[in-house]
């Protein structure tokens, strides 16, 4: 991992993004950079047979190591709620829902240092916690 070297001189901005796995946003710090040859500052996607493209402002993670840590903490804090949401969404195929139930059960049966991890849903906020 390596931070960007050529910043535009503007300050750091804090952004909050959702990844579609939790209503809780991931909070990151970004900074405008000076694009170099080969940098991709656009996003492409298909809409049927039509390729669409939009230009993006040139922002990069302000500190890659801090962003990596923030992502790890985000995943640890939100993964169980995201897994449960998949099992509860009746729009998902039953095979998918059953697979995610199995993943949750396996997680609950993990043992660390001969102590069982107990995962409980908090009655106040509905979030899962490791006890």
Image (cartoon, rainbow, N blue to C red):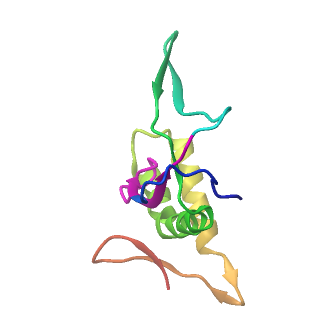
Q: Is residue 96 above or below residue 66?
A: above
Q: Residue at x 53, y 67 (%)?
A: 70
Q: In which quarter of the image is the N terminus?
A: bottom right
Depth check: give the residue in front, 7 or 99: 7
In-image side of 112 versus 119 (left or right): right
Depth check: give the residue in front, 17 or 32: 32
User: Within the magenta stretch, is there residue 23?
Assistant: yes
Q: Is residue 90 above or below residue 27?
A: above
User: Within the magenta stretch, is there residue 49?
Assistant: no
Q: In this view, does 27 lie above or below 17?
A: below
- Dividing the picture into quadrants, the one containing residue 41 is top right
- Horizontal and vertical percent position of residue 113: 72, 89
Determine the residue located farthest toward the bottom in the rendered image: 114
Determine the residue located farthest toward the front in the rendered image: 9
Q: Which residue is drawn at 58% across and 67% down?
A: 72
Depth check: give the residue in front, 76 or 46: 46
The span picked out in magenta is 14-34
């Amino acid at each position: 991992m390596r931070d960007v070297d050529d910043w535009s001189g503007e300050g750091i901005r804090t952004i909050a993004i959702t990844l579609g796995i939790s209503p809780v946003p991931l909070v990151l710090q970004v900074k405008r950079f000076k694009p170099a040859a080969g940098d991709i500052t656009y996003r492409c996607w298909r809409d049927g047979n039509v390729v669409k493209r939009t230009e993006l402002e040139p922002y990069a993670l302000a500190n890659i190591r801090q962003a990596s840590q923030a992502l790890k903490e985000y995943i640890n804090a939100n993964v169980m709620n995201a897994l449960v949401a998949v099992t509860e969404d009746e729009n998902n195929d039953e095979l998918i829902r059953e697979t995610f139930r199995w993943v949750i059960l396996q997680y609950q049966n993990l043992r660390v240092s001969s102590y069982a991890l107990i995962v409980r849903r908090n009655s106040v906020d509905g979030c899962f916690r490791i006890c």
